[in-house]
Image: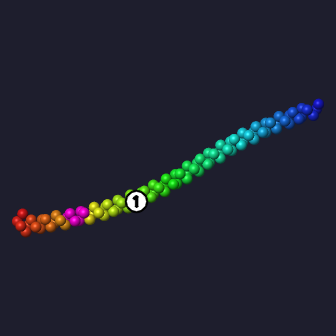
Amino acid sequence: MSGKPSIEAALSRLDEAIVSLEQSITKRKTKDLSVKAMQDDLQRMSEERSDLTDSLEKVTTRADKLEGANEEVSRRLGAAMESVRAVLEQHGG
């Protein structure tokens, strides 16, 4: 009979070890899923950053073109105003 208690004790320790192992596996899976989710978020944010960078470059290019066009229109308008003044002065206006 002395063998039975030690077998029961060993089985009890084995059960406790299995429960502990299962808990550790569950925790590890949870951490792995969390890391995977963070990696997915990082990838998505990197792609969004790239898209935003492209958009910003396009908007900046367009703004530069509009600024150049604005300067050209302003220059031409100033020249036209000078021409009108010159004509008015020649004709007594």
The range drawn in magenta is 73-78
Quadrant (top left, top right, bottom left, bottom right) of the C terminus: bottom left
The reply to whether the magenta stretch includes residue 7 is no
Q: Is residue 27 left or right of residue 74?
A: right
The residue at the point 78 percent across, 39 percent down is 18
**Amino acid type for the residue under numbered disc 1:** Lys
Q: Image height check: is 19 above or below 40?
A: above
Q: Nearer the viewer, residue 75 or 51?
A: 51
Rendered location of residue 60, percent (x, y): 38, 59
Residue furthest toward the left? 92
Find residue 69 and report its image quarter. Answer: bottom left
State how many labels appear: 1
The reply to whether the magenta stretch includes residue 75 is yes
Q: Image height check: is 39 above or below 87?
A: above
Q: Is residue 83 left or right of residue 92?
A: right
The residue at the point 38 percent across, 58 percent down is 59
Quadrant (top left, top right, bottom left, bottom right) of the N terminus: top right
The residue at the point 94 percent across, 32 percent down is 2
Rendered location of residue 64, percent (x, y): 35, 62
Q: Image height check: is 19 above or below 80?
A: above
Characterize the local packing of mark 1: few (<14), some (14-19) or many (20 or more) Cα atoms within 10 angstroms: few
Rendered location of residue 43, percent (x, y): 55, 53
Residue position for label 1: 58
- Type of secondary structure dominating the magenta stretch: helix
**SS at mark 1 in the image:** helix
Q: Is residue 54 left or right of residue 82?
A: right
Residue furthest toward the right? 1
**By what rule are the colours in the image chosen?**
rainbow
The residue at the point 72 percent across, 39 percent down is 23
Find residue 90 and report its image quarter. Answer: bottom left
